Image (spheres, grey):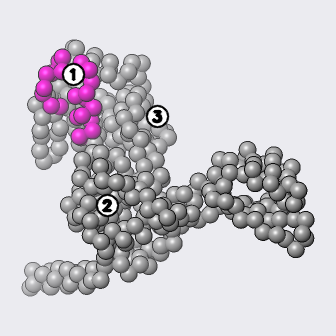
Amino acid sequence: MHSIACEKHNYAERERVSMSSQGKLIKLALPKGSLEKATFAFFERAGYKIRGQDRTYRPTINDDEIEIKILRPQEIPIFVADGDQDLGITGSDWIKETKADLRKVLDLEYGAVRLVMAVPKASASVPFSEFCRGYWKEGKKLRISTEYLNIASEYLTRLPFYKDYFGSKAPMQITPWWTKGENEQASIFLSFGATEAKPPEDADAIMDVVETGTTLDQNGLVPVETLLKSTAHLVANSDALKDPQKREKILDIMSVLRGVVEGSKKLHIFVNVRKENLQKLLEALPALKKPTVSELSDKDWYSVNTIIDKDYLIKAIPQLRKLSQGLVVHEPRQILPLEDTGLPEES
């Protein structure tokens, strides 16, 4: 009876998922974990309303053509490449690690981290390449703990003296389920988290992502080399981009998300300026496009409405103070350059 009840439950769940997917044009995978909170905040700023993410891995969104599924960022490149998802958001570190055949269509510019090699503080006096050479010169096994098996393996084999010691032998990658590679002297162990806790008993060095490096420091480790910098990316399945309907919808989603990226870099300013100072002010303000200039009820005054780079405001203050009055500054939620899709060409 128990097995029959379970089967009925599973059937009902499959039916629910199937029915919820009907009419959906785009399957979108959003990341669980470290990128999760920032991703939902990003989508909210874009105007999307996502509901139920705290209770289910299939939340709803206020766009009837999009179906969302929450997945680990490590998995998303594979599912997108295989076509199980049309779009996904994941870190560029996982795109490189998985070597997934997909399209990176938009750098969302949040979730910035560095992938670093780190060693115990007592061993941080030499470059990491020399740290490795010291182990191999003495015939000792070098143990690296990381979630990034492929990146670590490629890094070690690119060291200029690796071939001198080991020829074409691949570093050994070790997981609970399988082991591959022939070179035990360069052993890379799959970490399931808390990577910084592994040295010195279980690893000689680690490869891990950091934001500030505080956690490494608290665990007696020092980053000695940065391998790459990673941010959240919107990625797409290549076949989905070839489907006319899906491509148009993907371009719509890209435009909205790109608007948030651009909006975070710009400021919307309004100033009032005397007629005799108008031209000087216009020449002093670099604008996204030509500024909007409106005549006020007092014919000797004009209102100028424009977009400037956020970093430029401090430089502009002296000129604005001399030439205008009544400065109002807004941080825009989005700036959408609709005439430019921003979709990269096929590489």
User: In the visual, does 146 lie left or right of 291?
Assistant: left
The circle on residue 189 is none
Q: Residues within 10 Å of mark 1 (few under 14, many from 20)?
A: some
Q: Which residue is mark 3?
A: 217
Which amino acid, by three-letter code, is at mark 3?
Answer: Asp
- Front one among 170 and 33: 170
Looking at the image, residue 256 lies above or below residue 325: below
Which amino acid, by three-letter code, is at mark 2?
Answer: Ala
Q: Position of residue 74 (x, y in %)?
A: 29, 53
Q: Which residue is mark 2?
A: 236
Which amino acid, by three-letter code, is at mark 1?
Answer: Tyr
- The Cα–Cα distance between marks 2 and 1, rounded to whole angstroms, is 36 Å
Q: What residue sits 62% from the left and 56% below the top?
A: 288
Is residue 56 in sight in this rendering?
no
Front label number (2 vs 3): 2
Front label number (2 vs 1): 2
Q: Which residue is mark 1?
A: 162
User: N-terminal of the two: label 3 or label 1?
Assistant: 1
Q: What residue sits 17% from the left and 18% below the top?
A: 165
User: N-terminal of the two: label 2 or label 3?
Assistant: 3
